[in-house]
Amino acid sequence: MNDYITRIADDALYVSAELRQVSTARKNAALTALADLLVKHSTELKAENARDIAYARETGLEASLVDRLTISDKVIQSMSKAALEIAALPDPVGEVVEGRTLASGIRLTKVRAPLGVVALIYESRPNVTIDVGALCLKSGNAAILRGGKEAIHSNRALTKIFHEALATQKIPAAAVQLIEKTERSLIVDLVKCTRQIDLVVPRGGEALIQFVTENSLIPVVKHDKGVCNIYIEKDAPLAMAENIVINAKTQRPGVCNTAECLLIHKEWPHGAALLQALQAKGVTLHSDAGGIQDFEAIGVQVQPFLNDLGFGHEYLSLDIGVRMVDNLDEAVKHILEYGSKHSEAIITQNMPLAQKFIDALDSAAVFVNASTRFHDGGEFGLGAEVGIATGKLHVRGPMGLKDLTTTRYIAMGHGEIRN
C-alpha cells in the first residue's frame, strides 16, 4: 500500500470521529464562509483554472470535458450558491427515522448517521471539489477527493479555499482532502483502503468507472453515462416539443442529462419541423439505415452513425440519434435496449399514456412534458449533488445529503438485562 495514500486515508478516518460531533451551526458557518471566499478569490481561481484549460487544449482534451473543466464567473457564483443552499438545508445527522419502546422497557430509536469517509474519483469537473466537499461536511463525512490531472491546478486552488473556510470554525483541514498526486496507480491503492474508507464514488467516463469498479474492495456507487431518451407521442404540441427538445440537447450538450436520442411517433405531423429546428441550432442528426430512409421521406437529411456507433452512444456534443417508432411500446422497447437508466422523457397530452411510460421504465428519473436537463441535484432542491446515480443500491438519481448518511440504532435503558 502506498504510504501517501495510507496517510490520507488514516487522516480522514481520524477526523471523521471529530466531524460526527461538529454542531450544525459550525458546519453552516463554515459553508457560509466558503461561499464568500469563493467569490473573494475568484481572480486567483480563474487564473489557476486557465493553466488547466491551456494544458487541456494542448493535449487535445475533448470539447465536452473542456466545457466541464472551465471555471467562469457563472460557475463560481453557482458553487457559492450551492454552498449557501447546502447550509440552509436541514442537517440529516441525528434525524430520528423511527422510535418505539420495546417490551423490555428499552427505548429504541433509529437515527441518521454519517457514512464516515467518502472517496470521490472524478474527471474534469472542478466544481465537484466544492459540491462534494460541502455535502460531505454538512452530512458529517470526511471527504477524500481525487480529481484528474487535467484539473489539478483548479482543484488545488479550490481545496485551499475550502481549508480557509474550515479554519474559520476550527474544523481540521483533513475533513476535505485532495489527492494531489495524479498517477492512476494510486487509485488502486485508494480503493483498497477498506479499514478507513466507507464508500467510493467514481464520476467520469466509462473507462474510469469500469476501472474503479473492477479494482475496488470498498462498496461503489456508480454515476454512469447518461444515454437520455425523449419520446414524442403523436398528440404532442409542436411548440412544447420544440422547446423541450432544443433545451435538452443544446442548452449544455456536454453533460450527462442532455438528450442523446429522440424517438418520434410516426404519425406525429410535426417531425420535419422539429428536426429542422434542431439542425438550425447546429445539431447533427444520426440514425441507422432504416431511420435515414424514414426521415428522407419527410424531407429531412439524417447522417449515419459516427464510426458505427449505435443508439446507445453518449455523444456529449451537438449530435443526437433519431428514430421513428410505431407507438409507445416500441419507444419503451428501444429505451430498455439502448438506454442507460439515467433520464427519459415523454411529451404528450395523454396522461394515462404518460403514466404507462413511467410505469414501464425503471430509469433514475422520468419526465413528463419537461426537459431532461432538470435531472440535477440543484434543480431538485438538494443544493448540489455528489453525482447522479444510475444503479439501484443504495441511492438513485441525484445523490444528496441524506444519501451520504446511513442509519443506526440507539437503545436507552434503565438497567434492563435479557433473560
Image (spheres, grey):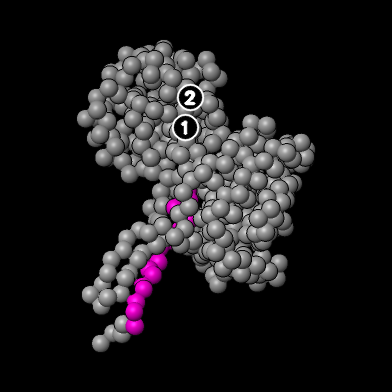
In terms of secondary structure, where does tag 1 sit? helix
From the viewer's perspective, tell me whether residue 176 is left or right of residue 215.
Answer: right
Q: Residues within 10 Å of mark 2 (few under 14, many from 20)?
A: some
**At x 54% / y 70%, what residue is drawn?**
194
The three-letter amino acid code for the residue at tag 2 is: Asn
CA gap between label 1 and label 2 equals 8 Å
Residue 213: mark? none
Mark 2 and mark 1 in contact (Cβ < 8 Å)? yes
Residue 267 vs 313, above or below: the answer is above
Q: Residues within 10 Å of mark 1 (few under 14, many from 20)?
A: many
**At x 48% / y 52%, what residue is drawn?**
91
In terms of secondary structure, where does tag 2 sit? helix
Residue 252 part of the magenta segment:
no
From the viewer's perspective, tell me whether residue 77 is left or right of residue 347.
Answer: right
Residue 305 visible in rendering: yes
**At x 71% / y 48%, what residue is drawn?**
161
Residue for badge 1: 373
Hey, which residue is sitting farthest bottom in the picture?
419
Region in magenta: 400-415
Residue for badge 2: 247
Q: Position of residue 69 (x, y in %)?
A: 66, 39
Closer to us: 239 or 314: 239
Q: Position of residue 212 (x, y in %)?
A: 55, 58
